[in-house]
Amino acid sequence: KETTTDIISYGATLGANLGAHIIKVKLPDADGYGLPSNEKLDIYKNVSTETLADRVKIVVKSVYDGHRLVIHSGGSTKTTEEVLDEIRALRDGGAFGSIMGRNVFQRPTDEAIQLLHDVQDILVGN
């Protein structure tokens, strides 16, 4: 599956190896391995993949140990709390941001502005 942690990490590494400094990837899900060989090798044996933040850390580490910017796509439409939980996980995992256009622009203006303020508060620690 293309959204497993190992596949997303490989894609991010490939982008970095090709010279990209900013790499956009999907969010890594908790569905295990994308490559059966990785499952046989148990590549995450001593690495936690339980939370989204854990999986984001793996992806960020895969791009020259975090020396490239990793931006995650926002994915499908989510509730406000789901968006904010995702932003917290991205922050805790060391990601550099989230592309969340659909989750902002498909809301009423006042709600969208409040969501952006809440995201800023999470990212800057207010």
Image (tube, rainbow, N blue to C red):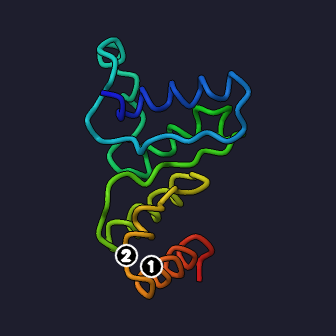
Real-space Cα separation, disc 1 to disc 2, in angstroms: 6 Å
Tag 1's secondary structure?
Answer: helix
**Front one among 90 and 110:** 110
Identity of the amino acid at label 1?
Answer: Ala
The residue shown at (57%, 57%) is: 97
Q: Is residue 122 left or right of residue 4?
A: right
Report the number of discs.
2
Q: Nearer the viewer, residue 82 or 78?
A: 78
Q: Which mark is residue 61?
A: none
The residue at 43%/54% (across/down) is 74
Q: Position of residue 28 (x, y in %)?
A: 39, 41
Write down the residue under mark 2.
Answer: 107
Which comes sooner in the sequence, label 1 or label 2?
2
The answer to which of 87 and 102 lies nearer the viewer is: 102
Q: Residue furthest left?
A: 31
Rendered view: 97 above or below 4:
below
The residue at 36%/17% (across/down) is 38
User: Residue 114, how many percent across, how many down?
Assistant: 47, 84
Q: Residues within 10 Å of mark 1 (few under 14, many from 20)?
A: some
Q: Give the label on residue 112, or none.
A: 1
Vertical placement of residue 123 versus 34, above or below: below
Residue 67 screen position, x and y as percent: 72, 40
Q: Is residue 82 left or right of residue 22?
A: left
Q: Determine whether 121 is above or below 25 in the image.
A: below
SS class, disc 2: loop
Image coordinates for residue 87, horizontal then vertical, percent: 46, 63
Quadrant that contains the N terminus: top left
Disc 2 marks a residue whose amino acid type is Arg
Quadrant of the rendering where the C terminus is positioned? bottom right
Do tag 1 and tag 2 residues touch (Cβ < 8 Å)? yes
